Amino acid sequence: NNTVCCAVHSGWRGTAKKIAQNAIRFMIEKFDIPVSEIICAIGPCISQCCFEVSVDVINELQKEIDGISHYAIKKENKRKNQKIEDI
């Protein structure tokens, strides 16, 4: 029986590239860990009030994550004169 520890940081790019799923798949394949033995914890994450991204980021995320636009809130960024989204 293998004991493995894995830590993954997932910003928006990692999320779009499914880094969490890839890490789990890697542990299963490389270390022969059964899915039933994997314990996963999600730590603190940035919230809508603190994380603004351009519309381009939302568009990139939509290519990989169905329904991500449901979590985005459109608003104007008066400092940069552009549209931004909170996710």
Image: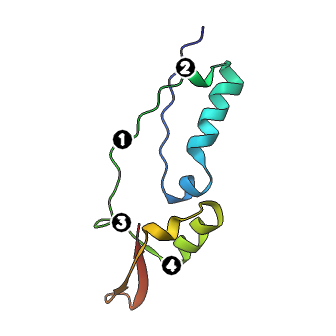
Residue named by callout 2: 37
Residue named by callout 3: 51
Element type at marker 2? helix
Which of the two marks, 2 or 1, is nearer to us in this view?
2
Mark 3 or mark 1: whose residue is earlier in sequence? 1
Quadrant showing the N terminus? top right
The residues bearing labels 2 and 4 have C-alpha atoms spaced at a distance of: 39 Å
Mark 1 or mark 4: whose residue is earlier in sequence? 1
Q: Which amino acid does label 4 sit on?
A: Val
Residue 8 x/y as whole percent: 50, 39
Residue 67 x/y as whole percent: 54, 65
The residues bearing labels 3 and 1 have C-alpha atoms spaced at a distance of: 16 Å
Residue named by callout 4: 55
Indicate which disc residue 20 carries: none
Above or below, 47 against 43 in this view is below
Quadrant showing the C terminus? bottom left
Residue 35 x/y as whole percent: 60, 25
Residue at the (42%, 80%) spot, across then down:
84
Mark 2 or mark 1: whose residue is earlier in sequence? 2
The residues bearing labels 1 and 4 have C-alpha atoms spaced at a distance of: 26 Å
Say whether residue 63 is left or right of residue 8.
right
Q: Residues within 10 Å of mark 3 (few under 14, many from 20)?
A: few
Q: Which amino acid does label 2 sit on?
A: Glu
Residue 30 x/y as whole percent: 70, 24
Element type at marker 1? loop
The residues bearing labels 4 and 3 have C-alpha atoms spaced at a distance of: 13 Å
Residue at the (63%, 27%) spot, across then down:
27
Residue named by callout 1: 43
Residue at the (40%, 40%) spot, across then down:
42
Above or below, 76 against 71 in this view is below
